[in-house]
């Protein structure tokens, strides 16, 4: 693919400032994907599949760990570590893994404010994307990183009061585990 510099130069700036931004990541990704080679489109499909929390599994993570693409391999390896550590934290179990960012992640888990904890988790992922793509110039990894960040921005943009209430309820239920005595949905 020879036109990465044109595509990347035409992308909007993304800021993780948790405020509404005019961004339709899905439409933008669709228009960019149309300009990519078939091989690059398959990488975008990998990204979409991995960012779909409903479809991801240990089989996906195993395949991503062996993937030849740097971004797919590195990002989803990190994503798995964060998810595994979060599950242990929620279950109040000891996390057996070890990765460079784990001390920072433990500090994030210690944040009492649920909204701030989510913001800091997204900041951690954002920083990892920057780290992975920092030495990349005008290639598919920059695009994969951009669209991963775009999903984060879009998630915060879509949080209207009702969505925020749903996120809060989900987080409370996640923290409370199996406790069913109180309906946190209303």
Image (cartoon, helix red, strand yellow):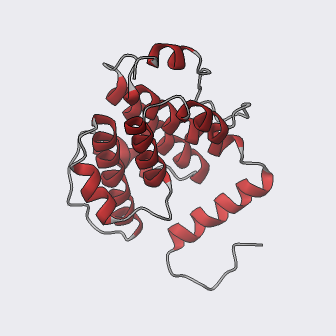
- Between residue 57 and residue 9, name the one nearer to us: 9
**In the rendered image, which quarter contains the C terminus?**
bottom right
The residue sitting at 52% across, 14% down in the picture is 6
Instruction: Tell me where residue 178 appears, x and y as whole percent.
Output: 51, 81
Q: Name which quarter of the figure residue 102 lies in.
A: top left
Q: Is residue 10 above or below residue 51?
A: above
Q: Is residue 94 above or below residue 74?
A: below
The residue sitting at 21% across, 55% down in the picture is 97
The residue sitting at 63% across, 45% down in the picture is 155
Instruction: Tell me where residue 61 appears, x and y as whole percent.
Output: 30, 57
Instruction: Tell me where residue 107 appears, x and y as whole percent.
Output: 39, 45
The residue sitting at 59% across, 26% down in the picture is 15
- Between residue 120 and residue 76, name the one nearer to us: 76
Q: Is residue 46 above or below residue 85?
A: above
Specify the farthest residue to the bottom: 181
- Between residue 94 and residue 54, name the one nearer to us: 54
**In the rendered image, which quarter contains the N terminus?**
top left
Decide if residue 100 is on the left or right side of residue 139: left
Q: How many marks?
A: 0
């Amino acid at each position: 693919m020879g036109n990465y510099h044109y595509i990347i130069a035409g992308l909007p700036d993304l800021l993780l400032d948790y405020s509404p931004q005019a961004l339709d990541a899905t439409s933008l990704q669709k228009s960019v994907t149309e300009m990519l080679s078939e091989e690059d489109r398959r990488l975008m499909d990998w990204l979409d599949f991995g960012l779909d929390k409903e479809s991801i599994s240990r089989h996906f993570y195993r395949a991503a760990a062996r993937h030849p693409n740097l971004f797919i391999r590195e990002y989803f390896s990190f994503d798995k570590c964060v998810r595994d550590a979060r599950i242990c934290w929620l279950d109040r179990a000891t996390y057996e893994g070890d990765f460079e960012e784990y001390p920072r992640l433990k500090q994030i888990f210690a944040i009492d404010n649920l909204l701030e904890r989510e913001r800091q988790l997204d900041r951690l992922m954002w920083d990892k994307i920057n780290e992975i793509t920092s030495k990349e110039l005008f290639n598919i990894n920059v695009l994969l990183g951009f669209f991963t960040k775009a999903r984060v921005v879009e998630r915060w943009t879509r949080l209207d009061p009702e969505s925020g209430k749903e996120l809060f309820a989900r987080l409370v239920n996640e923290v409370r585990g199996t406790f069913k005595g109180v309906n946190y949905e209303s």
